[in-house]
Image (cartoon, rainbow, N blue to C red):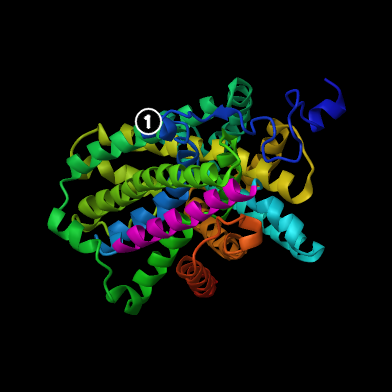
Amino acid sequence: MSALDAIEPELPEGADRTRSLSNVHRSIPVSSSRFFIRRLLAFIGPGYLVAVGYMDPGNWATDIAGGAQFAYLLLSVVVIASLLAIYLQSLAAQLGIATGKDLAQLCASSYKPSVRIFLWLSAEVAIVACDLAEVLGAAIAFNLLFHIPLIIGVLITALDVLLVLALQHKGFRWIEMLVISLIVTMTVIFIILISMSSPQWADVFKGCIPSPLILTHAAMLTVALGILGATVMPHNLYLHSAIIQTRRFGSTFAEKKEAIKLAIIDNAVALSIALFVNAAILIVAAATFYVHHQRSVGDIQTAFELLTPILGTTLAVPLFAVALLASGQNSTLTGTLAGQVIMEGFTSFRIQPWLRRMISRMLAIVPAAIIIWIEGNKGINSLMIWSQVILSIQLPMAVIPLVQFTADRKKMGGHHVSRPVMILGWFSAITILVLNVYLVGISL
């Protein structure tokens, strides 16, 4: 392979280099069957690739802290954040189908160079921050399962690039099927863990109702904002607007309208599963640590160490670690795709997926390895929380363009959002911005 081949990926014959993920663009056929279920099946996949970003190791840290410290009171925050995620990801899918471009491409073509560069760098920072949480989560899982030193576990995570490369060569459906399989694994594990922890279901349902105490209790509000920051991921908005275009839907108004409806269903179901997993993490933490007065638990490793003595079974420990490893590996797969979409969309510069993956992974591994080397295990939780703070800061930079474009009649070709939906979008963007400013303030 020449040096040029390592940089410029080879595309299938007839592939359009101007399209997102051009090697898999329109690669998955959509059935024209009169049966709704058969047409829907073609769209099942993108929502699940997006959903993994909403249950990555960063979410684990905030959900565990919320359940251990405040029992079930912050379940309402998990529900609200998940509903916001469903709303924003639906807009991203609608944008990709209606315009034929992803969010990064539209930002690049719609804004002046200074704004475009700022948004691109913000998105790249978000990718590295997310990768950092995934590296740490995977390293912790390796340590818990196989007693591998954390710094070695961090270095091992660089090898996942081989898995990404192999799957992309096999086809996009292979990536989707692996991700869905890992999500199913996590879901089954948490069903088992919930049954082991025996939560008080009356309190669980009560916790799903927002309490004014969240806004008046400083410590609770801090954790609540952390849950919000860890749940809604900025790079997922770029990713969803691109991967939805792997479907070979028609170009007429009616065909695009149905494609939008099917994509929204896929998104809603997938993110509802992510809602369950996040809620389950918090419920297990509340039913074990809070109830047994272990309310200082704020990190994944401490939670792991306390599960066996509290639940009285050694089965909980490997289940917990396997779910964590599945979470980290899932997120690394979609992180690769998101990074590719962002780089290609903003700069039109294309490199081999494995090279792109290695660059972003190295940017995450270096700070993780340094912190572990200097501070040991105690520095991990702080680093993971800060990665979520960084993601939270970057979120408005993706939400604001998304709302602006989906409300644009000309860009959307008649598939623009209604005025109430647009108002909700702007309200969400402003609320996120205000909350993030507060979150940064209390974190400094």
Answer yes or no: is residue 405 visible.
yes
Number of labels in the image equals 1
Q: Which residue is drawn at 25% across and 61% down?
A: 208
- Give the class, few, some or many, for how many residues have Cα within 10 Å of label 1's Cα (few <14, many ≥20): few
Left or right: 14 in relation to 61? right
User: Which quadrant would residue 27 be assigned to in this image?
Assistant: top right
Q: Which of 168 and 132 is in front in this view?
A: 168
Q: In this view, does 104 lie above or below 42?
A: below
Q: What residue type is labelled 1?
A: Phe
User: Which quadrant would residue 433 be assigned to in this image?
Assistant: bottom right
Q: Residue at x 70, y 34 (%)?
A: 22
Q: Which residue is drawn at 51% across and 75% down?
A: 434
Q: Is residue 66 above or below residue 377?
A: below
Q: Nearer the viewer, residue 371 or 272?
A: 272
Quadrant into which the N terminus falls: top right
Q: Residue reaching furthest bottom?
A: 216
Q: Which of 431 and 19 is in front in this view?
A: 19
Where residue 323 sits in the image (x, y, percent)? Answer: 37, 36
Is 178 magenta? The answer is: no
Quadrant into which the C terminus falls: bottom right
- What's the magenta region? 76-99
Q: Mark 1 points at which residue?
A: 35
Where residue 321 sits in the image (x, y, percent)? Answer: 37, 36
Secondary structure mostly seen in magenta is helix
Q: Which residue is drawn at 24% across and 55% down?
A: 286
Where residue 346 sits in the image (x, y, percent)? Answer: 74, 51
Dot 1: what SS?
A: loop
Left or right: 55 in relation to 416? left
User: Which quadrant would residue 12 be assigned to in this image?
Assistant: top right
